[in-house]
Image (cartoon, rainbow, N blue to C red):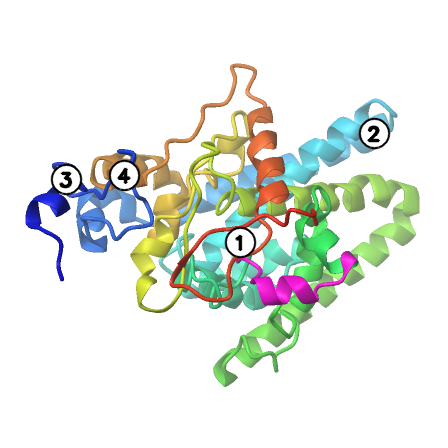
Amino acid sequence: MDPPTNVVEQLKDERGFVLKADGTYDLSAPPPFTLSDIRAAIPDHCWQRNTVRSFAHLALDVGIVFGIAAAAYAANSWFVWPLYWLAQGTMFWALFVVGHDCGHQSFSPSRTINDLVGNFVHASILVPYHGWRVSHRKHHGNHGHVENDESWYPTTKSIYDKMDPVGRTGRLRFPWPLFAYPFYLFNRSPGKQGSHFDPECDLFVPSEKKMVLTSDAFLIGMAAILVAATAKLGIAAMFNLYFVPYWVFVMWLDTVTYLQHHGSSDPTDKLPWYRGEAWSYLRGGLTCLDRDYGIFHKITHNIGTHVVHHLFPQIPHYHLVDATEAVKPVLGPYYREPVPCAPHGVPLHLIEPLKRSFGEDHFVADEGEVVFYQQDPKGV
């Protein structure tokens, strides 16, 4: 029997947002707006992809990469190298975001330009452009779905129980998951098989196999460059110039992508995950989180402005802030306002939700259309 109309009204506010019994918003409930409502709120200029502007951002990134490498190599000081590792690892992450935009076709209106730039940029940081592009497309198309999502999706209880201590440590025990990305490229996530480098992986349809092989060829070329540079400059120099910054980049990537889908700044706000008819593209996208990365936010091309990006990945990074401001009134409580960074600009405030999430978000139930992370009382 349906509940009385007045009871239903008491469980919603004047805009139709569903309320819990304690008066807080139930953000796992279907929202009272549509994807079209959000789209309509975004200004027209936010959809414009400007190839010249995108290349200008890329040129600045590349200039900084080579400039700080030359300066650090010339200084060759124990004091300079750690600063360089952080700076260059951050710039590698910025380059990744450029390649990421190419994969979404938001770098340029030209697919040829997007794929060419994406292959060059991603190969420079040892990422298979097409292999990752396809898996990332699957992530966007299934975000928030327990089984169908592709990256950082929850481990179900049955899979969790089968994981050995090494697997649990690598996936769930802070800080080890922050080094996971290269292993994900080779093996994907728990419960999924295949490799981003293998054109026969079930990630890819037959028409994409040549693309995967093309990106593999770019990576072989980059490997050859690294071997030649090591022969010329020596192992110690390349360790400092490239390999340590690479791992800093990996930590950036894993930290940022994890925080985009885990660890609300409000400890009482448990993000929902969906299955079956409860899942929709809109509801899955509304579980994303924006973050403030302080001094690194603009440097890494607004990648922390993530909610609008996940719903409309074709928007270029330089329009994400404007688009986000425009849709906030539509999203209402479904937009979780990011905690601002401290005046010093270093995003240390994000350590707490990162560690808390790894300490609490261990698995979800094997059944149920709307589920939330549960904590293993015995620890990981």
Label of residue 21 in the image = 4
First in sequence, mark 4 or 2: give its number.
4
Q: Position of residue 148 (x, y in %)?
A: 47, 68
Q: Mark 2 points at which residue?
A: 74
Q: Position of residue 48 (x, y in %)?
A: 29, 48
Separation of residues labelled 1 and 3 (CA atoms): 48 Å
Instruction: Report the mark closest to the observer, 1 or 3.
Output: 3
Separation of residues labelled 1 and 2 (CA atoms): 29 Å
Separation of residues labelled 4 and 2 (CA atoms): 64 Å
Going by the image, does 280 lie left or right of 41?
Answer: right
* Dot 3 crowding, Cα within 10 Å, few <14, some 14–19, many 20+: some
Identified at 55% across, 37% down, the residue is 60
Separation of residues labelled 4 and 1 (CA atoms): 45 Å
Identified at 59% across, 43% down, the residue is 360
Q: Mark 1 points at which residue?
A: 99
Labels 3 & 2 near each other (Cβ < 8 A): no
Separation of residues labelled 3 and 2 (CA atoms): 69 Å
Identity, as a three-letter code, of the amino acid under mark 3: Gln
Which residue range is magenta in the image?
Answer: 153-165
Q: Does the magenta stretch include residue 241?
A: no
* Dot 4 crowding, Cα within 10 Å, few <14, some 14–19, many 20+: few
First in sequence, mark 1 or 2: give its number.
2
Instruction: Report the mark closest to the observer, 4 or 2.
Output: 4
First in sequence, mark 3 or 4: give its number.
3
Labels 4 & 2 near each other (Cβ < 8 A): no
Residue placed most toward the observer, 380 or 214: 380
Identity, as a three-letter code, of the amino acid under mark 4: Ala
Identity, as a three-letter code, of the amino acid under mark 1: Gly
Q: Name the residue under label 3.
A: 10
Identified at 43% across, 52% down, the residue is 107
